[in-house]
Amino acid sequence: VPYFLERFKKADEYAGPANTFVLFPDLGAFKRNNESVLQHLKLDGDHILYIKKTRVGESVSREEKLFYVQGNGEDCELTSLSPKNHILIIDDFTNSGSTLFGAANLARKMVEGEG
């Protein structure tokens, strides 16, 4: 992940830390990669997001909300995104891609004036 974060940061399209969000499709990926995002992209904590997902057997469900962790460790909900925001979705394990597509669709719904 660090290698890709550095490449992302160097790209001409990089929007800078004020307009960039990183979205993890689940809390596990968030916990494994949060520090790397902080170190390489220098984003504020409320710009590093995750989706609460539960798995029971073959069934997967997720909350249709975006969360971040405050400095005190408390989960907070992000209620909207701006059309000028850029969202990088990172998933460290994927099978069918349904989690990635779900994260992208949820992020689209969160854009002010779009959903």
Image (cartoon, helix red, strand yellow):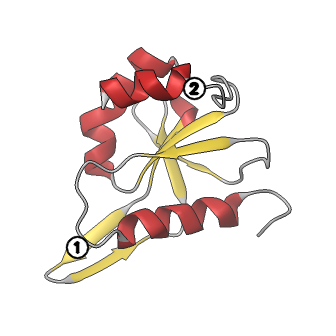
Considering depth in this image, is 74 or 58 the residue closer to the camera? Answer: 58
Please state which amino acid type lies under the numbered disc 2: Ala
Q: Quadrant of residue 30?
A: top left
- Residue shown at 72%/49% (left/top)? 81
Residue 55 percent location from the top left of the image: 22, 73
Crowding at label 2, few (<14), some or many (≥20) Cα neighbours within 10 Å?
A: few
Judge whether residue 71 can be spotted in this image: no
- Residue shown at 24%/37% (left/top)? 32
Q: In this view, does 73 lie to the left or right of 79?
A: left
Marks 1 and 2 sit apart, C-alpha to C-alpha, by 35 Å
Q: Is residue 49 left or right of residue 77?
A: left
Return the mark for residue 55: 1
**Which part of the image, by quadrant, shows the N terminus?**
top left
Q: Is residue 60 left or right of residue 5?
A: left
In the picture shown, does residue 98 fall above or below 15?
Answer: below
Crowding at label 1, few (<14), some or many (≥20) Cα neighbours within 10 Å?
A: few
Judge whether residue 51 can be spotted in this image: yes
Considering depth in this image, is 63 or 105 the residue closer to the camera? Answer: 105
Disc 1 secondary structure class: strand
Residue 9 percent location from the top left of the image: 53, 22
In the picture shown, does residue 49 fall above or below 108?
Answer: above
Which circle, 1 or 2, is nearer the viewer?
2
Residue 22 percent location from the top left of the image: 50, 40
Please state which amino acid type lies under the numbered disc 1: Arg
| Mark closest to the chain's N terminus, 1 or 2 | 2
Disc 2 secondary structure class: loop
Q: Name the residue under label 2.
A: 11
- Residue shown at 23%/68% (left/top)? 95
